[in-house]
Amino acid sequence: MKLIRTENYKEMSLEAGKIIVEKIRSNPAITLGLATGSTPKGVYEYLIHDCVANGTTYREAKTVNLDEYIGLPAKDSNSYHYFMSQSLFNHLDINEDHTHIPNGTAANLEQECLRYEELINELGGVDLQILGIGQNGHIGFNEPGTPFSSRTHLVTLAQNTREANSRFFNSIDEVPTHAITMGIASILESKEILLLVSGGNKAEALLKLINGEISEDFPASALKNHNNVIVIADRDACKYI
Ligand code: GLP
């Protein structure tokens, strides 16, 4: 893993944005793996700005998102479908049919997991995966204890994940209890991975990632088994390392 330290969130977003744009420009038909949460928002703003200002085009690009809540329809403002449309897709020249997110309202959720895995294969795999990290080390919605061999699957969200994400909802009771997520094995098949870490509340997780063992108790540690991971972390996140 290569670690790039930045002064603050803005610089982290800029560094990541520059790397992503360079990849898109050298491979316009790229398949990007995308994440939700607060962390990548600045990167998405950078991509939008760059698309408008510098004309980087997404006409041939494809995207696959890591995860989605179970039970929230795409039009629900807390769904990851909604988040991605608002934060990124609506502002790029990307073909909506080329953007993929697990369907958390599918009638048959097990079937949906299989469909999603097949879809990623049909796209030829993810070229560049953008990741955030949960305070407990989760990546996507792969909570501690998830086997490293996992593929796209259904998960019960950890209580601390629901609490952390409740800031987007009116109350914790509204936070879904389940989600569908790409598995750790699915994520590790990405050719390159960019992990973004920002803020003092992620400092312990980053410390564990850098200095800790590789263990299923800490899902992000699986990234150490991948040979092309760049971690971009701001000063607050780096306070223990
Ligand atoms: C969520 C998402 C993850 C994300 C994580 C951190 O639970 N499923 O993909 O990386 O939380 O979110 P944030 O960036 O808001 O801290």
Image (spheres, rainbow, N blue to C red):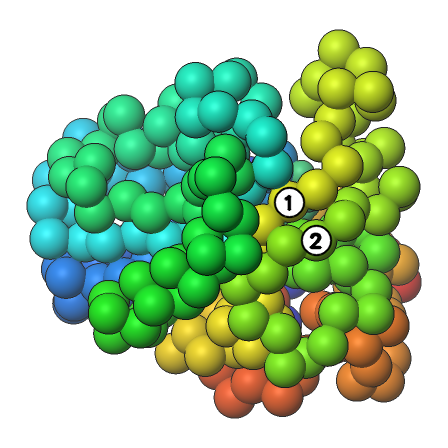
* Residue ID at (16%, 67%): 26
From the image, which quarter does the N terminus lie in? bottom right
- Image coordinates of residue 227 in percent, x first then y, are 52, 88
Specify the amino acid type for callout 2.
Val
**Residue that appears at 74% across and 27% down:** 175
* Residue 9 drawn above or below residue 75: below
Left or right: 55 in relation to 101: left
Drawn side of residue 233 relative to residue 135, left or right: left
Residue pictured at 85% horizontal, 33% vertical:
163
Out of 136 and 96, give the one closest to the viewer: 96
**CA separation in Å, label 1 and label 2:** 5 Å
Q: Which mark is residue 74?
A: none
Residue 201 visible to the viewer: no
Residue 36: x and y, percent?
Answer: 54, 41
Label 2: which residue? 155
Asked whether 92 or 141 is in front, the reply is 141
Q: Quadrant of ligand 1?
A: top right
Q: Residues within 10 Å of mark 2 (few under 14, many from 20)?
A: some
Q: Position of residue 168 (x, y in %)?
A: 69, 21
Disc 1 + disc 2, Cβ < 8 Å? yes
> Would residue 241 be found to the left or right of residue 142 on screen?
right
Q: Closest to the observer: 32 or 142?
A: 142
Disc nearer the start of the sequence (1/2)? 2
Q: Secondary structure at mark 1?
A: strand
**Ligand 1 contact, mark 1 (Cβ < 8 Å):** yes
Tell me if I can see residue 119 in this picture.
Answer: yes
Q: In what element is the residue under mark 2?
A: strand
- Residue at x 46% of width, y 40% of height: 106
Identify the residue under disc 1: 179
